[in-house]
Amino acid sequence: MANVTRQTYDEVMMPVYKPLEMVIERGEGVYLYDTHGNKYLDLAAGIAVNCLGHNNPGIVKIISEQAQKLIHVSNIFTNTKTLELALKITHLTGFDKVFFVNSGTEANEAALKLARRYAYEKYGEQKDEIISFTHSFHGRTFFSVSVGGQPKYSKGFGPKPGAITHLPFNDIKAFEKQISDKTCAVILEPIQGEGGVIKADSEFLSAVRNLCDKHNAILIFDEVQTGLARSGTLYAYEQMGVRPDILTTSKALAGGIPCGALLTSTQIATHFSLGSHGSTFGGNPLACAVACYVLDVISDKNFLQAVQEKSKHFFTGLNALKDKYKIFKEVRGMGLLIGAVLSDEYQGKASLLQELCGKENLLVLTASPDVLRLTPPLIISDKQIDIALELLDKACNNFIQACK
């Protein structure tokens, strides 16, 4: 094996990320190990991807078995594992039709294209407006990143797709004023992940649903980060009393293998006619075989109940740290998607706290410059949560000293 170091990244990789100093070599359960043998407790889980932890024995077994049978086949054909996953996910969610992709970005891109095509064919080309919300994040293709509500990610790449409107999140009056018969779709995250772990108000979601129905607009829920048991139910919308017309999902769907999906009704799905959309690798048998296994595990009611109990454990501990150090003004989120919001005195310094956590061998995320984000593997134990809170306690103390 080549002798690689953190410096190797700077030498050969495009500078779109700024990784921490360690170079990860392997993982096991909720832990990661670097090239020097250092052990890290992982509360990032590949940004809410490794739901069953690292090197999960069940996933490894499925990958090995499926790799010996069939890894990829053209979509000129279909295959057993893709069809098994399609049956499983439609049964669990109640949606009629599914289209498989490789990522959340691709799922959202497909959803937006489908919404535009549906409106065009059913109501005419004048019905093309897409309403999104500030601080939202829906992917990195030029269409999806333009729909996302963070201009820093779409600025500087030339003319943007038109007919996209961004409104304040959770602002019913602004939404009521904007939506019209020209609106073809509304896209939102039930909990804005990258934007700061901001939960949608139930009254807001209800108003959005009712107004979408009134104006014949498709409601898209981006559950790429909130879905797949992360919220304590299979999908977060189940706890919110509002059902979308289109659901997008990815990240944890195959526990670390790239896999995503778009789910919708038969009525809407028919507007993706023959040849109107496609994906070379989407729905490949290897990813679908793993996703079948993951869904079986995480959809179990006892597993979902355990996520909810672990969430309470985390929130209790984080609120105790909030009271102890006064560096957080709020702990928010749902299930094991948690955001600790920095107090006004420490605004903009989430990356510093993240770095100091890393020095305590605790891996965490940020969500905006003001929010520390935790998305641990869903299999984390109560004992491991306690260890994580102890390490975070040390990092918080060091953070205060560093900010003096």
Image: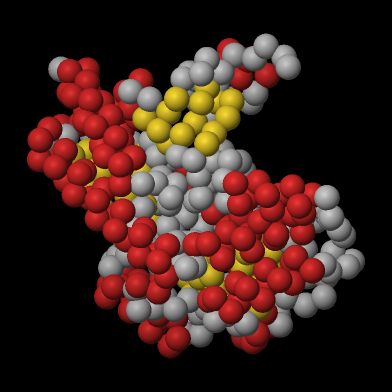
Residue 203 relative to residue 279: left or right = left
Q: Quadrant of the N terminus?
A: top right
Indicate whether 149 appears above or below 125.
above
Q: Can residue 320 be seen in this view?
A: yes
In the rendering, at what x and y percent does residue 144 appear?
A: 57, 55
Indicate whether 191 appears above or below 354.
below
Q: Residue at x 64, y 14 (%)?
A: 4
In the rendering, at what x and y percent does residue 267 appear?
A: 64, 87
**Which residue is more in the foreground, 376 or 102?**
376
Indicate whether 55 appears above or below 75.
above
* Residue located farthest toward the right when viewing the structure as drawn: 76
In the rendering, at what x and y percent does residue 371 appear?
A: 30, 41
Q: Is residue 143 visible?
A: no
Residue 319 relative to residue 332: left or right = left
Q: Which residue is drawn at 53% across and 29% down?
A: 17
Indicate whether 266 appears above or below 147.
below
Q: Residue at x 10, y 40 (%)?
A: 323
Q: Which residue is drawn at 51% across and 18% down?
A: 37
In the rendering, at what x and y percent does residue 175 appear?
A: 35, 71
**Which quadrant of the figure has residue 291?**
bottom right
